[in-house]
Amino acid sequence: MKRKSAVVAIAVLLVAVLILELTIIQQLSSQSSCAESSSKIIGVDGPVSPHNLFVKSSNDGHSSNPLQYERDPARTSHQSARVAPIDEQDELIQVAKHRGLQRVDDKGPILEILTQAGMKIEDENDLDQETLDRLPTWTQVQNMYGSKPIIHGLEKCEDFRNAVEPKTRFFGVAGTFNTGTNLVADLLKFNCQITERMEVYGEKSKGVRWQVPWGKHMMARYRESDHTTDTDKDIPKDHILPVISIRDPFSWMQSMCRHTYAANWPHNKHHCPDLIATEADISIMPKLNALYGNQDDGDLEKLVPVDIKYNHELTVHHKSMAHYYIEWYNDYLKADYPRIMVRFEDVLFYGEEVTRTVCQCGGGVPVTDNGRSGRFAHVSESAKKGANAHGAKSQRTNLVGALIRYGSFANRTDSMTKDDLAAARRHLDPELMEAFGYRHPG
């Protein structure tokens, strides 16, 4: 009897132990699941904003969790759900509401961008209802450009850092005309520095140059040519990390119509960018008349050629404005040396995240004091400043104007004919368009 009681007791004990183990496993699994879920929205120091990543760095100045830019499902569908603002953005929303401003709930990140540029939401002279209404909602921005930036070239960052010692590294900016190259350069200058260079060459030598040595508007194919800018003759070209700015081709072509720079092609204000010549174009424009005036073939694709005069010795011919765009950017996209390619629109709307990522790629660290307690400094006025700025002062775009203009697809295809839009579909490389999340008008 005693033996039977002992067996029963042992069995009961084993069952109890098994139940206890299952309970512990279940609790651990639940904790792990919660931790994994929380890690998607909470950083080491608290909630992570798309605009405050400069303050989320490790002791050595580099992120302990390097940013990864994978394909964003929201960008594929271009339909994003409204995102709840983080605490800092919510505070700005409440400040705006306290002033009596309306329709502000979906503009928290936009308000944060404005404060990064030094604007005061509480000051009616800095932000009024009319301006607020013209600014895009964050849902609109995400539906247009996705919920995070697209950056190409991050896989080569380590190669660049390993190949070039820190004190001789530089960032250099490049891009076609009208792609915000000056803005990219200013954001890097205000917010990034290579401290090892500064220790050797002084505090002003932060390692950020406003262009690459072969010329910021030059095609990448001329990187190995003898052409070098006057101020960069002594800089080894492989010591530069090129930072390339690209832009939605349709809004870019509209800007080229307003500011042609070194581009020369037959067009007028009634038909621009003029990818395909119309009969009216051919009748009034001598160059097009010489090309197509005697052509009776109605099936002939009457592309409008573009010449880019880089200097008195070099003019590059392209079949059309669309060809200019894809040939210029495919040169850099297909390059095998380290380079970073960023979207102009991301520089505007995800400025801090983009700048911080580029800075880290080249071995830089955030500027410890940019006049705003170490926080990210956006550019409030146009980056095109001074006597050498492009275009008349009245035509330069400040940050607010840029956020309004590029927070909408309005005017993206102004003065383009059906033939122009069809030609854009034929000639704008679909792989390039897909790589940067740009799409044709619906």
Image (spheres, rainbow, N blue to C red):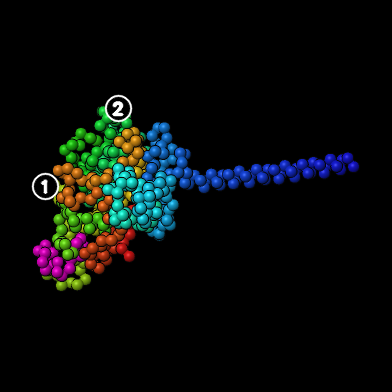
Magenta region = 272-292
Left or right: 293 in relation to 371: left
Dot 1, crowdedness within 10 Å: few (<14), some or many (≥20)? few
Q: Which mark is residue 312?
A: 1
Q: Earlier in the sequence, mark 1 or mark 2?
A: 2
**From the image, which quarter does the N terminus lie in?**
top right
Q: Can residue 433 be spotted in the picture?
A: no
Q: Can residue 29 be spotted in the picture?
A: yes
In the image, residue 239 lies at what x, y percent?
A: 28, 36
Kindly identify the amino acid type of the residue bearing the numbered disc 1. His
Dot 2, crowdedness within 10 Å: few (<14), some or many (≥20)? few
Which residue has dot 2 on it? Answer: 199
Q: Residue at x 26, y 57 (%)?
A: 251
| Camera-nearest residue between 209 and 34 | 34
Q: Quadrant of residue 238?
A: top left
Residue 276 shown in magenta: yes
Q: Residue at x 26, y 52 (%)?
A: 401
Q: Residue at x 30, y 27 (%)?
A: 199
- In the rendered image, the residue lying farthest to the right is 1
Of circles 1 and 2, which is in front?
Answer: 2
In the image, residue 356 lies at what x, y percent?
A: 35, 41
